[in-house]
């Protein structure tokens, strides 16, 4: 079966750095996405990785290792507004997105 | 602004009622999707459409139907609502060009409660 695993909840301190991991087992791979979702709101796109390596976009970076079925999202200089759920999704061989359950990130002052 | 809109935003209904959720987009995307989200679970794909004449079942299509009335409109129907269809429903769109990751853009969601 297809599976996306990410931690249920993480806590970090304002101004710090946090890494959210995602491991996947899917039928085929056509890219990995990270989305941010504030409570009760729509998911919004953060990053896309299709090749191995690190993609940096401002305070957010995303890493992919296809051979290990592993990705992480790195958030630097954490702000209170970063408190949200972070969703990992993999596009499979049918070009459908398989979604993880999300990691709820709590930022403390 | 180009956008994805959903109506209604909230709906409370009773078991056995027929419900329609509507989605419209001004992004010019040809691909549209319906998802449901339950607490503690990932987004689950109900139906998707790659163009007006293309409708496909997702992983949890039982109890749902869809209609793609135009490129910009994609509606989801619950023929006879049941309590375990209580969830947050999202519509999403993406393009199909040769370049880019084709990320999905989401509407604001419809919170549906079936009593």
Image: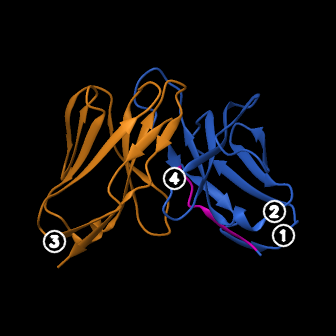
Q: Are marks 3 and 2 in contact (CB under 8 Å)?
A: no
Q: Nearer the viewer, residue B8 or B26?
A: B8
Q: Residues within 10 Å of mark 1 (few under 14, many from 20)?
A: some
Chain B, which colour? blue
Residue at (76%, 46%) from the top-left corner? Answer: B62
How many discs appear? 4
Question: Circle 1 sits on which residue?
Answer: B15
For this orientation, the residue located farthest to the top is B98
User: Which circle marks residue B1 in the picture?
Assistant: 4
Q: Label 2, secondary structure: give it.
A: loop
Find residue A1 and report its horizontal and vertical position in percent.
51, 35
**What's the distance in space between the residues labelled 2 and 4, CA to CA?**
34 Å
Q: Main secondary structure of the magenta part?
A: strand
Asked which quadrant contains residue A37, the reply is: bottom left
Q: Are marks 2 and 1 in contact (CB under 8 Å)?
A: yes
- Whichever of labels 2 and 1 marks the residue nearer the N terminus, that label is 1
Q: Mark 2 and mark 1, same subunit?
A: yes
Asked if residue B32 lies left or right of residue A74, the reply is right
Residue at (42%, 26%) from the top-left corner? Answer: A30
Residue at (46%, 55%) from the top-left corner? Answer: A43
Chain A, which colour? orange
Q: Chain of mark 4?
A: B
| A56 vs B7: above or below | above
Q: Are marks 3 and 4 in contact (CB under 8 Å)?
A: no
Magenta residues span B106-114
Question: Circle 2 sits on which residue?
Answer: B81
**What's the distance in space between the residues labelled 2 and 1, CA to CA?**
5 Å
Q: Label 3, secondary structure: give it.
A: loop
**What's the distance in space between the residues labelled 1 and 4, CA to CA?**
37 Å
Asked which quadrant contains residue B66, the reply is: top right
Q: Are marks 2 and 4 in contact (CB under 8 Å)?
A: no
Question: Circle 3 sits on which residue?
Answer: A14
């Amino acid at each position: 079966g297809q599976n996306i695993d990410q931690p249920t909840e993480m806590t970090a301190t304002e101004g710090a750095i946090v890494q959210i991991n995602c491991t996947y087992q899917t039928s085929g791979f056509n890219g990995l996405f990270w989305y941010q979702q504030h409570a009760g709101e729509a998911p919004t796109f953060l990053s896309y990785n299709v090749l191995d390596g690190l993609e940096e976009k401002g305070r957010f970076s995303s890493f992919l290792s296809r051979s290990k079925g592993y990705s992480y999202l790195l958030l630097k200089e954490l702000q209170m507004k970063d408190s949200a759920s972070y969703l990992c999704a993999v596009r499979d061989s049918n070009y459908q997105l398989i979604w993880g359950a999300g990691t709820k990130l709590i930022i403390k002052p | 602004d180009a956008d994805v809109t959903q109506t209604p935003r909230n709906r409370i209904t009773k078991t056995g009622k027929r419900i329609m959720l509507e989605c419209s987009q001004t992004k010019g995307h040809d691909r549209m999707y319906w998802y449901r989200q339950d607490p503690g679970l990932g987004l689950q794909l109900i139906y998707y459409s790659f163009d007006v004449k293309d409708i496909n079942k997702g992983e949890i299509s039982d109890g749902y139907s869809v209609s793609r009335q135009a490129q910009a409109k994609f509606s989801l129907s619950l023929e006879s609502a049941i309590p375990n269809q209580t969830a947050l429903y999202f519509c999403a769109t993406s393009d199909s060009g040769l370049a880019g990751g084709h990320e999905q853009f989401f509407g604001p969601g419809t919170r549906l409660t079936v009593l």
